[in-house]
Image: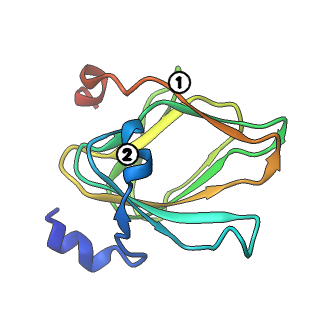
Amino acid sequence: MTKEEFDKINVFGLGNPNDAYAKYFTGKSFLNPLTDPSKTNVFLANVTFEPSCRNNWHIHHAKSGGGQLLICTAGSGWYQEEGKEAVSLEPGTVITIPANVKHWHGAKKDSWFSHIAIEVPGEGTENEWCEPVNDEEYNNL
């Protein structure tokens, strides 16, 4: 899928380069906040990944509640929890990530990809960024 084709179906918009979190991504990503944290306790953002872009392994820690929801909206991507097979992500796929589960997500090699990321409110929530996804493992998907 070309960038021009992707832009036509990426209904929540590309947003700005995700520079604040670039060190936790392989490749380039973009962030388009959909809610204002000062007006609600639920933060939603459209995250867009260029082809082959993915975030590092990471964990959404919480004492209670917490975790993350992904609602896939455009393109094709991958989601993987530690110790499990990768799951193909297509528009309409919804992924529920419990708190304290190590995982990563991102675009497939040949596709742009967007999902809405929702931080689930909880007690004692914090994110832990871990190592990058191994190139060999990613390229074998």
In the displayed structure, would residue 13 be above or below residue 107? Answer: below
Residue 119 location, quadrant: bottom right
In the displayed structure, would residue 103 be above or below residue 43? Answer: above
Q: Is residue 106 visible?
A: yes
How far apart marks 2 and 1 lie (CA) works out to: 15 Å
Residue located at (76% from left, 65% from top): 41
| Residue placed most toward the observer, 75 or 126 | 126
Residue located at (37% from left, 45% from top): 106
Residue located at (68% from left, 67% from top): 37
Dot 1 amino acid type: Glu
Judge from the rendering whether residue 4 lies leftward or rightward of residue 101; answer left or right: left
Residue under numbered circle 2: 106
In the displayed structure, would residue 79 be above or below residue 33? Answer: above
Judge from the rendering whether residue 37 lies leftward or rightward of residue 132; answer left or right: right
Q: Position of residue 53 (x, y in %)?
A: 29, 44
First in residue order: circle 2 vs circle 1: 1
In terms of secondary structure, where does tag 1 sit? loop
Residue 85 location, quadrant: top left
Judge from the rendering whether residue 46 lies leftward or rightward of residue 100; answer left or right: left
Residue located at (65% from left, 63% from top): 43
Q: Which mark is residue 82?
A: 1
In terms of secondary structure, where does tag 2 sit? strand
| Residue placed most toward the observer, 128 or 19 | 19
Say which quadrant the C terminus sits in.
Answer: top left
Q: Position of residue 131 (x, y in %)?
A: 44, 23
Dot 2 amino acid type: Gly
